[in-house]
Image (cartoon, grey):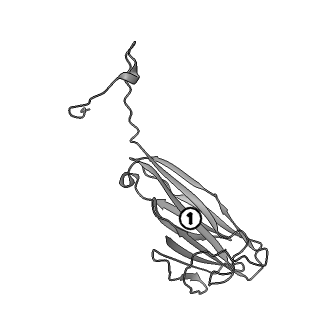
Amino acid sequence: MRSAYLIICASGLALGLGCSSTGSSTVAPTTGSASAAASTPTSTPSTTQESMSVYPLSVAVSIPSSGTASPSVLTVTPLNMPSASTVYIQCSYSTQAIASAVTTINGATASITLTFKSPSLLGIGTFQDEVIVGATLDAAGTENVLDSPVTVPVTFTVTGSGYALEVREPGVDSSRLRLKAEGKPLQQ
């Protein structure tokens, strides 16, 4: 699992971002200052009604092996936050098909942009990943807001090249045909 770490302050949106493949991160603040290590979201509920929403709750991508997948975006919105409070958004993800997850701030929401590995490198098949998004009220990651963490399943399907051969012969049962191909590719 790879992890990303983000801080959102309800008043003024001071934030810090960091990402690491080892599960810990350095924080590079864009305004204000912050430092902490990323942690996997925990399940200790908050005693208040602070919460978060994540949209969409699942991602499904299907692409031919010769194609390039467009990034998918998850939107994380802290809800019912008191003014001048800080929310710590934590994100971890598996890497069967996900190449990276980059977190950015858009006003009072966070966006997690998922980019995918090349379908031609993965090969034909279905690849299952998950993104775990958590929101806590403390840097240690122990005081979860309501509805946190959220696991977003990601299904990435690589299909064939998109070329098919169809044989039609009147009066011939095509289910009993056998095809043997030999020779060189056709030149245009």
Viewer-nearest residue: 112 or 94: 94
Q: Position of residue 183 (x, y in %)?
A: 20, 32
Q: Position of residue 176 (x, y in %)?
A: 37, 22
Who's the residue at 56% across and 87% down the image? 35
Q: Is residue 70 above or below residue 83?
A: above
Q: Work out which residue is located at the far left of the displayed protein and give it.
A: 183
Q: Helix or strand or loop: what does disc 1 sit on?
A: strand
Q: Is residue 166 above or below residue 67?
A: above
Q: Position of residue 78 (x, y in %)?
A: 70, 71
Where the C terminus falls, by quadrant? Answer: top left
Q: Which residue is mark 1?
A: 131
Instruction: Give the image quarter of residue 133.
Output: bottom right
Who's the residue at 64% across and 58% down the image? 57
Say left or right for 159 vs 138: left
Q: Position of residue 70 (x, y in %)?
A: 49, 54
Say left or right for 85 vs 33: right
Q: Work out which residue is located at the far top of the displayed protein and give it.
A: 171
Q: Work out which residue is located at the far front of the displayed protein and give it.
A: 176
Say left or right for 159 vs 9: left
Who's the residue at 32% across and 26% down the image? 178
- Which kind of residue does numbered mark 1 sit on? Val
